[in-house]
Image: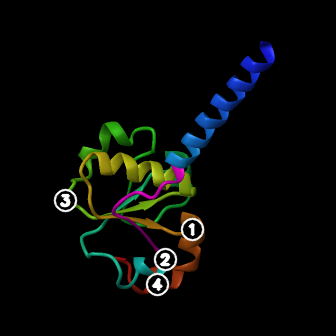
Amino acid sequence: MTAALAMTGGILLGAAVSGYLLRVMWPVPGLTFVKAAALCGTGLPPQTKKLDVRDASYYEECHLDGTVNISLGRLPFVWNKELSPEDPVLILADRRLAVMKAARILRRRGFKQLYALRGEVCQVRATLKPCFEKKPAC
């Protein structure tokens, strides 16, 4: 009897973990991943807001000019101070899972044009340094 309970518990735990992983990795409708070059060229609408969802300490250490910093934990509560659902938003984070979570939060609030930067913010900043020097408004 205990072996059957243990087996059932293992199956339930496996199903819960699988469900969680499926939900986290499932594509977010309206989310488009863009390469770093989109920051200084074409590929994004001109009025796109850049949202950095990293913690403030990481943001202060390295960030792109013109970005809004709202950490992922605060995003569900303070997004409307800086963003509007009509705005196209570029999400910046160091982890894909953080990008997906931020995109889900914003989608639930009515955002339709969501973009995510491929790669870590500091690496992208170092790669695009010549672009930022040429075009400071980038």
Asked if the residue under mark 2 is in contact with the one under mark 4, i.e. CB atoms within 8 Å, the reply is no
**Callout 1: SS:** loop
Choose the circle earlier in sequence order: 4 or 1.
1
Q: Which-is-in-front pick, marks 4 and 1?
A: 1
The range drawn in magenta is 24-35
Residue at mark 2 to residue at mark 1: CA–CA distance: 8 Å
**Callout 4: SS:** helix
Name the residue that disc number 1 marks.
Answer: 119
Place residue 127 in its image quadrant: bottom right
Residue 25 point in image, percent of width and height: 53, 53
Q: Which-is-in-front pick, marks 3 and 4?
A: 3
Choose the circle earlier in sequence order: 3 or 4.
3
Instruction: Identify the amino acid type marked 4.
Output: Cys
Name the residue that disc number 3 marks.
Answer: 86
Residue found at x 52% / y 69%: 118
Disc 1 crowd rating (10 Å Cα; few below 14, some 14-19, many 20+) is: some
Residue 9 image label: none
Q: Is residue 52 placed above or below 56 in the rendered structure? A: below
Name the residue that disc number 4 marks.
Answer: 131
Instruction: Identify the amino acid type marked 1.
Output: Gly
Residue 111 point in image, percent of width and height: 26, 55
Q: Is residue 2 left or right of residue 136?
A: right
Residue 59 point in image, percent of width and height: 50, 53
Q: Which-is-in-front pick, marks 4 and 2?
A: 2
Choose the circle earlier in sequence order: 3 or 1.
3
Q: Which quadrant, please, contains the N terminus?
A: top right
**Callout 2: SS:** loop
Choose the circle earlier in sequence order: 2 or 3.
2
- Is residue 69 something one can see in this rendering? no
Name the residue that disc number 2 marks.
Answer: 35
